[in-house]
């Protein structure tokens, strides 16, 4: 899994603009929060929901 993720990460920087690829790659942190909630039972607090929303909004602002 780690090798496949690394290959996709490198391909993202190869075929996309560096600023866009960098922002999209950093959204993996948001995915980790969501997966921790689903699979590990980590509580999803209001603060985390706001942080996820701000992360997506920031990504959209940079990409657009």
Image (tube, rainbow, N blue to C red):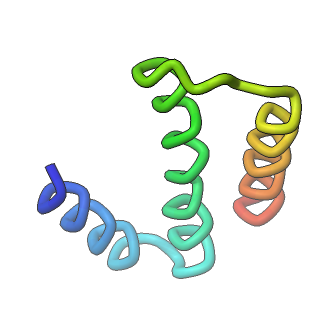
Is 10 on the left-hand or right-hand side of 42? Answer: left
Please give the name of the residue rendered at 49% of the width and 62% of the height, measured from the top-left corner: 25
Seen from the viewer's position, the closer of residues 25 and 2 is 2
Residue 11 or 27: which is nearer the viewer?
Answer: 27
If the image is split into quadrants, where does the C terminus sit? bottom right
Identify the residue at horizontal 51%, vertical 69% (top origin). Answer: 21
The answer to whether residue 61 is left or right of residue 17 is right
Q: Quadrant of residue 6?
A: bottom left
Q: Residue 4: which quarter of the image?
A: bottom left
**Percent x, y for residue 16?**
45, 71
Residue 44 on image: x %, y %: 70, 25
Locate residue 59, reporting x and y percent.
72, 56
In the displayed structure, would residue 4 be above or below residue 18? above
Number of numbered callouts drawn: 0
Residue positioned 18% across, 57% down in the render? 2
Q: Position of residue 31 (x, y in %)?
A: 52, 40
Residue at (74% x, 45% y) in the render: 56
Between 56 and 11, the residue placed more toward the observer is 56
Q: Is residue 61 left or right of residue 42?
A: right
User: In the image, 24: left or right of 60?
Assistant: left
């Amino acid at each position: 899994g780690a090798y496949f993720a690394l290959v996709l990460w490198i391909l993202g920087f190869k075929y996309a603009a560096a600023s866009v690829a960098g922002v999209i790659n950093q959204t993996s942190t948001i995915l980790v929060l969501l997966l921790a909630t689903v699979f590990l039972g980590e509580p999803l607090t209001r603060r985390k929901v706001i942080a996820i929303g701000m992360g997506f909004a920031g990504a959209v602002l940079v990409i657009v």
